[in-house]
Image: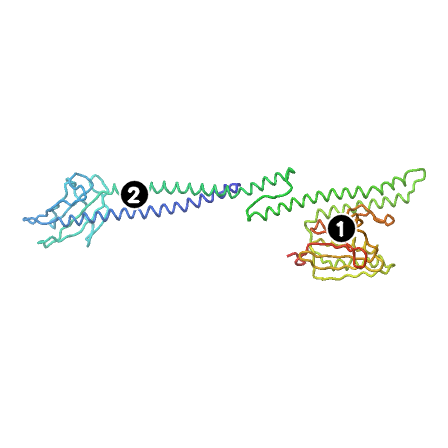
Amino acid sequence: MRWPRSLALRLALAAGLWVAAGLGGAAWFVASIAARHVEAAFDARLAALLDATVAAAMTDADDGIVLSRSPAGADFERPFSGAYWQVTAPDGSVRTSRSLWDQVLPAAATDHEGVLLRDVIGPRNEALRVAERDLLLPGASVPVHVAVGLSRAETQAEIARLRRTLLVTFAMLGLGLVGGVVATVVAGLAPLRRVRRALAEAREGRRTGFDIAVPSEIAPVVAELDALVTANRATVERARSHVGNLAHALKTPLAVLRNALDGAAPDLSAARAEAAALDRLVHHHLARARTTALASASAGAAPIEVATQVAGALRRLFAERDLALEVGGDPALHVRVDPQDLTEMLGNLMENACTWARARVTTSVAAAGREVVIAVSDDGAGLSGAEREAALGGGVRLDEASPGSGLGLAIVADLASLHGGRLELGRAVEGGVRAALHLPRLSSPTGT
């Protein structure tokens, strides 16, 4: 059987099948027990009539069999009434009730002791239930055979009525149960319908979050949907920011390039330098776009290991200045960041620190709850609060004499936000800038 696509229909159909099977079995069981009770009551009545007939049987003066009185409780006088008695003498003579008219009850097939109950076909092909036994009458030496029969038609009709009543009752009960299940399923799936409407509103831009009340069973799903929508919105915002940063970064090189090419004597060397700068900017932002697209597949990285590698490269780059680059912290700490992105973030921070440091740059790694704080400090002149805020804005060079586009710290902050972290700038103990990178902590290198 192919199940319907609707979850509500599936649950209702499954509930209907189980209810039908369960109530069908229960109805059969109850009907069987009730039918046995009705038949037992019928047999008890038949046995009572047999006892009354036995009590009334006696012999007359001619050793014939007579009944002193007609057994009460059945119509033995009306022909073919469905109630019959019969007494068979040892010589084969038969005495019957008036209801048998000119018929006799079928004899037992075998000898028996005690009361025998059996089903036979009586007058006019009527289904009878017969109770019979052998009885030794007072003054007689040979027992006589006494039999009482009752029609089964009334009992069978009563059992049929009982079964119909049970069938209707259990059918109505089953319909009520299935209806209750359907109502429960519809009510239980109402939160999912609310979530669907919320998703549609979010898609149409009429909703920014999933602030809806839902049961605890689907609350994690709603939370994940909310996180997904938030992440997608953040991706769009980052894309806009990248475009703005790129436009801002291209402004100055394009102006310089235009000036270098204008005029009677174009400065080709300057134009080539600015073209190279433009090429680097374009490649940088293309790499940034690829990083954003692959952020959801971020792996774990060890900050101490990455910082040590970056420090080694910077020692060679700033060899003439003889800077002291120190890296310290817990090597077992890992962050939930792509190793390449962490290398780029630490590279930007540590290179900036080396650029402005007088003699020493310190990088420390420490745990802070569910985060790992990577602090890069230098002993340079430092920045004021306004300058630190401007540096994080992007596109602003605090020293116009130095090369670059002013996007380094903004890119680090953007990457940190992409991975669920943040960048904070403060004043170092040595007097310079302390750049603190807060990133989500990874419980193990495998992320488990």
Q: Residue furthest right?
A: 264
Q: Position of residue 284 (x, y in %)?
A: 78, 47
Give the x, y percent position of residue 266. Answer: 92, 40
**Alpha-carbon distance for marks 2 and 1?**
87 Å
Q: Which mark is residue 159?
A: 2
Q: Which residue is mark 1?
A: 412
Please name the residue shown 25% across and 41% down the image.
154
Residue 72 on image: x %, y % = 16, 44
Towards the viewer: 301 or 50: 301
> Which one is closest to the eye, mark 2 or mark 1?
1
* Residue farthest to the front, as pictured: 385
The image's mark for residue 138 is none
Give residue 354's quadrant in the image.
bottom right
Per the image, label 1 sits on a secondary structure element best described as helix
Q: Secondary structure at mark 2?
A: helix
Q: Which amino acid type is marked by label 1?
A: Val
52 horizontally vs 330: left or right: left
Is residue 259 in view? Answer: yes
**With respect to residue 178, does 442 lie above or below?**
below
Image quarter in which the C terminus is found = bottom right
Q: In the rendered view, tell whether residue 356 sits above or below residue 180.
A: below
Depth check: give the residue in front, 112 or 305. Answer: 305
| Position in image of residue 313 (x %, y %) | 81, 58
Relative horizontal placement of residue 127, taking residue 332 as reference (left or right): left
- Residue 29 as seen in the image, left or right of residue 91: right
- Tag 1 or tag 2, which sits nearer the N-term? 2
Q: In the image, what residue type sits under mark 2?
A: Ile
Disc 2 packing (10 Å; few <14; some 14–19; many ≥20): many
Q: Where 265 sits versus 351, above or below?
A: above
Q: Residues within 10 Å of mark 1 (few under 14, many from 20)?
A: many
For image coordinates 60% across by 40% down, the residue present is 198
